[in-house]
């Protein structure tokens, strides 16, 4: 098949987004079982994956986690131009209007960067940005609303454990972020040497609160539009459905459908 027509364009994908109790947002993904993994559709086009992405929902919003393998060079991230460097982007449409070519007010673009936040520009940062060509924009998401954490092993100290940073929009996580998990679920902040990751692995973990999700209504609207793009300057792009040539960043009809599974009784 011609490279101009990717195999994934021939399908309309549906993926389950499972309900879960809120995890602690600390970058440690050991509490993310594979049942929350998004499928790897890249194999349909013969593309090898370098990232694993988990997604779950709760009454409090969406939870996202990502593990990327093979990274060697320093990060290049700039929140003012998040699309140019290392980033993960999540596109959502809370009404799953797959027949529309332009975003509505229920469509949003979220970005997650391993660095670029804080006063030193070395902390993880997350935010939301408008979708170009939208017929109507979603309400703005205030800075600092999305909680994010990241881990990466220090290249100069392979035996010293994992570098860990937690931020809500580039600022230290406040105490109420920890309350998303019960006390018996919490972990100590420092990672022990037994838990350290290989030097070429980094992780992201984030919580998008329901107040940031335009039209979030899991009971009445359990089907949502969904797209994920991972961009790494060492490793390239990994995406859920189609690539840049088909304008996924402005066209919700190119996204998959995510089905929010029922809450357990």
Image (cartoon, rainbow, N blue to C red):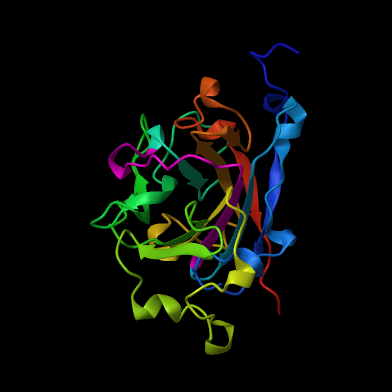
- Region in magenta: 61-82
Instruction: Give whichever of 158, 10 is nearer the camera.
Output: 158
Identify the residue shown where x is 63% and y is 34%.
Answer: 241
| Residue 234 position in % (x across, y down) | 53, 34
Q: Is residue 263 at all visible to an observer of this figure?
A: yes
Residue 219 in sight here: no
The furthest residue to the left? 119
Q: Where residue 26 appears, x then y in whole percent?
A: 49, 68
**Residue 252 drawn above or below residue 167:** above
Task: Tell whether position 81 is magenta.
Answer: yes
The residue at 37%/42% (across/down) is 77
Residue drawn at the location 59% of the way across and 64% of the way down: 196
Q: Nearest the camera: 157 or 207? A: 157
- Is residue 143 toward the left or the right of residue 179 in the image? left
> On the rendered image, what quadrant is the C terminus found in?
bottom right
The spot of residue 49 in percent (x, y) is 68, 38
């Amino acid at each position: 098949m011609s490279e101009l027509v990717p195999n994934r364009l021939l399908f309309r994908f549906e993926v389950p987004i499972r309900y879960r109790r809120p995890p602690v947002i600390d970058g440690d993904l050991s509490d993310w079982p594979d049942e929350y993994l998004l499928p790897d559709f890249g194999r349909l086009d013969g593309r090898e994956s370098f990232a694993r992405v988990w997604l779950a929902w709760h009454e409090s919003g969406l939870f996202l986690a990502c593990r990327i393998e093979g990274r060697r060079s320093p990060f290049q991230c700039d929140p003012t131009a998040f699309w140019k460097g290392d980033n993960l982007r999540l596109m959502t449409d809370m009404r799953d209007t797959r027949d529309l070519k332009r975003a509505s007010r229920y469509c949003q673009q979220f970005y997650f960067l391993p660095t670029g936040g804080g006063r030193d520009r070395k902390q993880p940062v997350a935010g939301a940005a408008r979708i170009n060509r939208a017929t109507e924009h979603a309400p703005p998401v205030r800075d600092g609303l999305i909680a994010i954490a990241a881990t990466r092993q220090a290249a100069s100290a392979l035996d010293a454990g994992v570098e860990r940073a937690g931020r809500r929009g580039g600022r230290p996580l406040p105490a109420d972020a920890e309350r998303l998990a019960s006390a018996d679920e919490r972990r100590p902040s420092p990672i022990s040497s037994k838990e350290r990751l290989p030097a070429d692995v980094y992780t992201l973990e984030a919580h998008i609160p329901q107040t940031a999700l335009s039209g979030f209504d899991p009971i009445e609207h359990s089907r949502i539009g969904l797209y994920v793009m991972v961009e790494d300057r060492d490793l390239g792009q990994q995406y859920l459905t189609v690539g840049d040539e088909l304008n996924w960043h402005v066209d919700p009809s190119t996204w998959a459908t995510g089905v929010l599974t029922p809450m357990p009784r």
